[in-house]
Amino acid sequence: MEAIIEARRNVNIAKAMLADQAKEKDGLVQNRTYVKKAGVAVYSSLLKAIDALLTGDKREYHYQDELYKIDKKITSHFVTAQQILQTSMGIDGSRSVEIAKMGISEAEKIITWVENRLNRNQK
């Protein structure tokens, strides 16, 4: 559960970074550096949360394939989160506030899903 706590903490830090330092104006971010940092931080935390659920050597599994074996619906959320957090935010530094919100929202859905699965497995 440590990975879940860390993931939620990093999501909250990323949200604060976007709100306080990225300087939103008219639905656009003025400082893309913070968008990139937020995207990378949330995506990295998301992968760590998923790692807590998956068994085996993480070098040998592909997240999308492993999630598909467990839950096809969550795989769609993962693909969306990956595209937004890693590419649109982390690499491109998208200036759209709505895109950033969507990426973080998808990550939060997956983190909650992982937390629920871990809780079920502990019972």
Image (cartoon, rainbow, N blue to C red):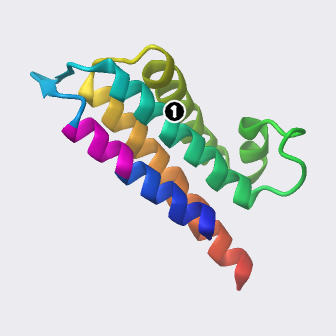
Tag 1: Cα neighbours inside 10 Å, few (<14), some, or many (≥20)? some
Residue at 36% x, 49% y is 13
Give the tally of numbered discs.
1
Residue 15: say if magenta: yes
Compared to residue 37, the image places residue 118 above or below, namely: below
Residue at 29% x, 18% y is 95
Q: Which percent across, then down, holds residue 120?
A: 67, 76
The residue sitting at the left extreme is 26
Point out the stretch of residues depicted in magenta.
13-20
Looking at the rendered image, the quarter that the N terminus falls into is: bottom right
Residue at 67% x, 70% y is 118
The kind of residue tagged 1 is: Val
Compared to residue 115, the image places residue 85 above or below, namely: above
Q: Which percent across, then down, holds residue 85?
A: 48, 30
Residue 65 vs residue 98: left or right? right
Looking at the rendered image, the quarter that the C terminus falls into is: bottom right
Give the labeled residue for mark 1: 40
